[in-house]
Image (cartoon, grey):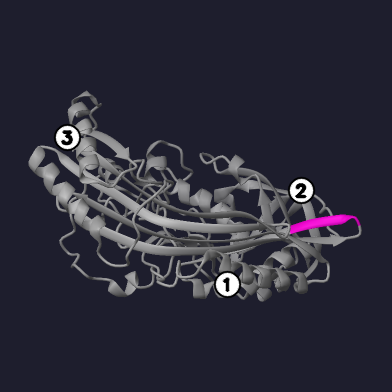
Amino acid sequence: MRGKSDFSSSPSLIPHPSSLDTLALEAVGWMKRENPALQSEVYLVRGQERSLEVREGQLETLQDRQYFGGGVRVVQEGRMGFAYAADLSLDSIQELFRTVANQIHLLPKDSFRQLPYPDQKIQPGSDRALRDTLWDPSLFSDPLLNKLEFLKQMESQAMQADSRIRRVVRLGYSESSGEVVVANTLGVQALEQGTYCEVGLSAVAEQGSEIQIGSSSQSCRFSKDLDFGRTARQASERAAVLLGSQKLPTRRRSVVFDPWVAGEFLDLMAQALCADQVQRGKSIFRGKMEKKVGSSQVQILDDPRRPKGLATSLFDDEGVPTRTKVLIGEGILKEFLYDTYTAAKDKRVSNGSANRASFKGTPSPGSSNFYLSPGNWSKEKLIQDTQDGILILDVMGMHMADSVSGEFSVGVSGVAIERGKITHGVKGAMISGTVLELLQQIDAVADDLTFYGSTGSPTFRVADLTVA
């Protein structure tokens, strides 16, 4: 269950089968007795999150909130109805069910609308080891203001990383824990629990009258895995390296993508690999199944079973068991992301990719831990092998990219690479092309796979793109 929700007030969470699970089963049992002719589903969420933010040395934001809510989905003869409420009581669920059941005959019919059946191969209690990688019991154990000391240390490390760093304009820390239950009258029952924490920093470098800003962040399931020092150093390096930036002459050259930037392009690809986008004709991958869409270096996976992954889950947001998927293997398009509905339209079965933004919406296909598989190059060797190129450290305007054609023309900043060496910062540059062109031109992939959120990439090189 990967969606984040936005709500207010709930009971405390416990990292084991809970009253939320009991409520879901009680609700499903009642709905089945109330109207056995309907396929019915309940989706329940609760959790807590807290965060603090420091700007220009002053504590600006301090938040601590809890949230909860539930949605009811009902299907009858291809008609589907849905209702939700920011409430976790049996009375509320029953009222939602009655509302939808009374109106479902008015809704349009779509023969592909259905709820999933349980997978009989899944044994209760299986994958306990994977579940243990998703919950950090140490979170929420200390007062949030105690994190200020860690942030102060991180600020000091950022300032010491380079003499040209003049100040840190933003520091932030957040942590959350959540619990989701999906159950339906066909026998599906799935419980997911997990924790999340994140730290971020933005630093300012100055040289004469020139000012550059660099940012970095890290997110983890466990607080012990947060590396405050690395985040501080990365932000400082990103700011300082851009001082003295120059324009590059317009021509086609090699483009090296830092993992921070690569995630922006991979997010666009993840959307295009969702079956609903393909079926609507809004994907660059439509009609390309089992065809070559990238170089042999391109191996793109969606792995909801990755230990400690931020989008790791044993079940998707319909309660279907998840599995690792090779979407593009050695440049060949192999699979799309399916939920139950889109799978039925393609005469397939769901591959456990249903996703919900919150309890307020119905599921649709979405990615989990989505990443480009690492290669055998070191980042240093890859740069040394590049004769004329740019290492991109930041990108602006990816939201303007055309998801249907895959065309992009975006602003970038980074550093020039000349004869295997980084020479100077680059600002105000543009790269343009198409996503398919980018995939087909990848000729080297490094071994430094790095995740930012649930999207990951190693450093990789595109042999030939227009840089203006």
> In the image, residue 144 lies at what x, y percent?
53, 64
Q: Is residue 36 visible?
A: no
Where does label 3 land, which residue?
A: 76
- The answer to which image quadrant residue 90 occupies is top left
Q: Which residues lie in the magenta part?
A: 209-213
What kind of element bears circle 2? loop
- Residue appearing at x 26%, y 52% in the figure: 182
Front-most of residues 8 and 205: 8
- Residue appearing at x 41%, y 71% in the figure: 136
Q: Amino acid at mark 1?
A: Asp
Q: For the residue carrying disc 2, how many other residues have a C-alpha within 10 Å: few (<14), some (14-19), or many (20+)?
A: some
Q: Name the main secondary structure of what is drawn in magenta.
A: strand
- Residue appearing at x 23%, y 42% in the figure: 93
What kind of element bears circle 3? strand
- Name the front one of labels 1 and 2: 1
Where does label 1 land, which residue?
A: 448
- The answer to which image quadrant residue 152 occupies is bottom right
Image disc number at residue 468 = 2
